[in-house]
Image (cartoon, rainbow, N blue to C red):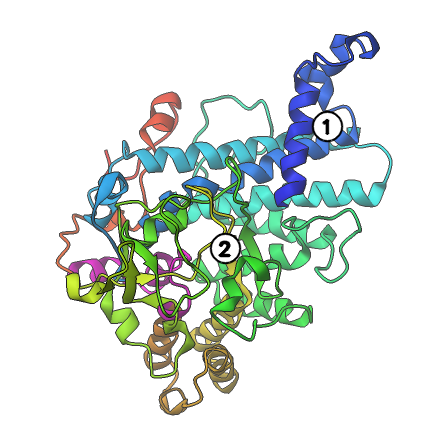
Amino acid sequence: MRRYIKSSLIILALLIGWSCEDQLDSPPFDEFAPENVLTNAKGIEAMLFNAYGFTNPQEGVHTLILPQETTTDIMIVSEGGVAGLNSPFETFTWTADTQWLNEWWSRLYRAIRDANIVIDNIDNFEGDTERKSIVLAEAKFIRGSTYALLYNLYGPVVLRKASGEPTNKARATEEEMLEFIETQLLEAIEDLPHPGSVPSYYKYGRATKGTAMAHLAKHYLNTRQWQSAADMTQEVMDLGYYDLYPNFRQLFFVSNEGNREMMSVWPAINQQGYHTTFPNGVASPDFYSAPNIPELVRDPAQMAAWATNWRVTDWVIDGMEANDDRALPAVDDYIDVTGSNLRYSDQRANNRRYMKLFDPNGQGNFHGVDIPVIRYADMLLSRAEALNELNQSIGEAKDLIKQVRERAGLTDHTTIDAASQGSALRNIILSERAKEFIHEAKRREDLLRHDLFLSNAEARGISVDGTHRRRFPIPAEEANNNDLIVQDQGYN
C-alpha cells in the first residue's frame, strides 16, 4: 500500500486541483472539478486510497499505542512533551477535551467519510466488474474495521452510513453498532481476494479476505462473542496462507515486511508524510547502540531520539522465561553517544526499552518500519482464548498457545499442560499476550475483556473514579457540534 497509495493520493490531488503544465492541451477545467472526480474508476479508486490513508496514523501512531499501554501495567512515559500529552491516560484523568481523543475521532471519521463516498459512487466505476466488486469490498472493510476501532475506544458512536448525512445525529445503540460492524466485515470478506491469489494490480497493504477476517475475529473476541471468535479464527487458519514467522525478533525487520504473519499493518516508509516516529520515543536521547540489537546503530546527526523515554515495565520482561526470544528486543545494556557502556536498569526501575520496531535507515524523525495491527499469532491466541471461555477443545487451545511459545524458543509447557479450563488457562493466555504484543496496543483490550482493566489500575495505585473509565468519552469537539450526542455518564 505504501508507494501505491502515495501515488494514488497524488492522482487524487491532480484530479481535484488544477495543473499548470501543458495548459494548451488540458481538458476543460470543469472536467477536473471535484464533483466530476468520482465519475470514473480512477477517481473512485483514488478516493479509496485516501480512505486507507486516514486509517493509518503514521507519525501519530504513538498517540494511539501509548494510551492503550500506559493505561495498563506494561508501559510508562515519563519525560518530554509527549509525556505531558499522555499523562491524562497514565493517571486516569482524561476528559472529553483531551487532545488525542479528538485527534483519533477526527481522523477515523475522515476514513469513514471517504469510504462512504466510494460506496455512494461505486456505480460510476466503469469497466472491470471484478475490480469494481473488490473496491466496494475494500470500502466496506475500511468502514467496518474503523467502526470496530471506534467502538473499542468510545463504545457506541454515530453511525454515518452515507455521505451528506446531517451533522446532528444520535449515537447508535449497542445492538445497531455490533450488527453494522459485523455486516460490513462479512460483506467485505465475501468479495475481497484470497491473500495468496491477489490480482496483479493489487499492491502491498490493501485489504484481503484474511485481513477482514482478522479484524472481524478480533471484534468478536473483544465483544465476548466467543463462539463467533472461535469460528472466525478457524476460518483464518483454514485459508492455509498465514503462518508464524520462524524468528520472533526478525519478524519486525523492515527487510521482512510483507511476511505471512502480518495480517494487517500500518505501513510506513522513511520519507516525510509517509513515515512513523515510533522508534524516536523508545530510544533514549543518549542511545547509540545495544549488543542485542546489532542491526541498529544510531547516528545522532542522522536519526532523532526524543527525550520522552517510552519504557517497558520490569515485570513483563522479568516474567519471560529463560531462552524466551521475546526478551531479545528488551534493551538494558547499551552504548551511549560518548562510547560509554551504560545500563538502563541502573538508572531507575521500569526503565528498559523494547526495541522490536526500528528502522536502521531512519532519517531524522522519519522511520519506515511497519506497525503491526493484527498478526497471525493473535489469531492463534484468540482462538485459544475463545475455546477456553467456551470450555471447548481445551487440548487444542493449549496446543495453540504452545505454537506461539515454541516460535519464541520455549519447549517447556509443564504449566500449560497442568492448567485447568477457566481462570487458570485464561491467566496463562493473558500472560502470553502481554509478552507477545508489547507496543502493539493490545493490553488495554485484553484486560477489558476480562473485567481486569480498572482493578489492574487500582493495583498500581491509580485512583479510578468510576466504571465509565472503561471507555473514553465522546470528544468535546464532536459533542459541541452535534446537538444529538449524549455523553457517557461520568464524563458530563
> What residue did someone put label 1 on?
43
Q: Could you say where residue 215 lies in the image, as x and y percent from the top left? A: 55, 55
Is 55 magenta? The answer is no
> Helix, strand, or loop for circle 1?
helix
Q: Position of residue 268 (x, y in %)?
A: 53, 46
Residue 260 screen position, x and y as percent: 62, 65
Classify residue 336 by image quadrant.
bottom left
Q: Which residue is under mark 2?
A: 373
Is residue 422 placed above or below 330 in the rendered structure? below
In the image, the segment drawn in magenta is 434-458
Looking at numbered disc 1 in the image, what kind of residue is underneath it? Gly
**Between residues 327 and 285, which one lies in front from this camera angle?**
285
* Mark 2 closeness class: few <14, some 14–19, many ≥20 residues within 10 Å: some
Secondary structure mostly seen in magenta is: helix
The residue most toward the front is 339
Q: Is residue 369 left or right of residue 476?
A: right
